[in-house]
Amino acid sequence: MTEPTHDEAHGGALGSRLNWLRAAVLGANDGIVSTAGLVVGVAGATDDRSALLTAGLAGLLAGSMSMAAGEYVSVSTQRDSEKAALALEKRELHEQPDEELAELTQLLEDRGLSTAVAREAARQLTERDALRAHARVELGIDPDELTNPWHAAWASFLAFTVGALLPLLAIVLPPADWRLPVTVLSVLAALVLTGWSSARLGAALPGRAVLRNVGGGALAMGVTYAVGSVLSAAGV
């Protein structure tokens, strides 16, 4: 029998890819909604292109850097936890190997293997690489695929930036009379796409996700535009 030669993603690798894709879609969605709310709010107060561009760029940079910093801190904490769990498991394997072998056997039994098969599988896995076996079966961690905070930070930064560029360009490029309708329609269309994508990645029905996404974005733009208009009318 020959070994399979294809490079198809399975198990944790596939789950990791889906998580990254979902994070990218949600990051882009955040960029769209927050920047759209900002520039539409400013548009309610003024039609000056320079003011709109300045506000949009400020929102884009602040949002993307905030997303990147938050993701870096969050994933760094997760990585530290994973490394600490692996260090503890390594020490336990050194200090009490028999107990750890019995624990691995029980975990495999809990997954549906018979006692004899679980015992033999645990023995073979331990002989091959005890730490990796316990990491994957007991902790749910792949020692070769620890979360990378820099990758997460850059992914969030880029996703937010790409999403934020749409409302920014839509509000500054068209003529003054067309800026608001072009921005609103462009943003709503983009929210339909991100809502549908996030639902599909989560194996959920897209209808409700799209409605929630579009409704939230429309509400954000409506509220900020009303606030901008009121402040403009009040001479603020």
Image: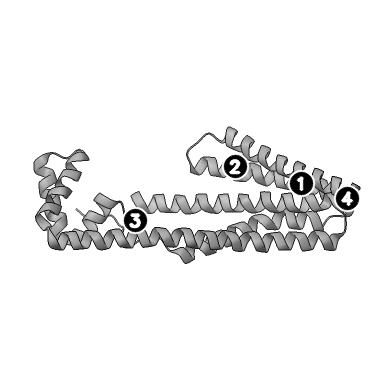
State the separation of the CA atoms marked 1 and 3. 51 Å
| Residue occupied by mark 3 | 6
Q: Secondary structure at mark 3?
A: loop
Circle nearer the viewer, 4 or 2: 4
Mark 3: which amino acid?
His
Q: Compare marks 4 and 2 and give the one earlier in the sequence.
A: 2
| Residue occupied by mark 1 | 224
Q: Compare marks 4 and 1 and give the one earlier in the sequence.
A: 1
Give the percent coordinates (x, y) of residue 217: 68, 43
State the separation of the CA atoms marked 1 and 2. 21 Å
What is the number of the mark on residue 139? none
Can you say whether 12 is above or below 113 in the image?
below
Name the residue rendered at 64%, 59% in the picture: 63
Residue at the farthest bottom position:
150
| Residue occupied by mark 2 | 195
Give the percent coordinates (x, y) of residue 101: 13, 52
Give the percent coordinates (x, y) of residue 132: 24, 59
Q: Compare marks 4 and 3 and give the one earlier in the sequence.
A: 3
State the separation of the CA atoms marked 3 and 2. 32 Å
Circle nearer the viewer, 3 or 2: 2
Q: Secondary structure at mark 4?
A: helix
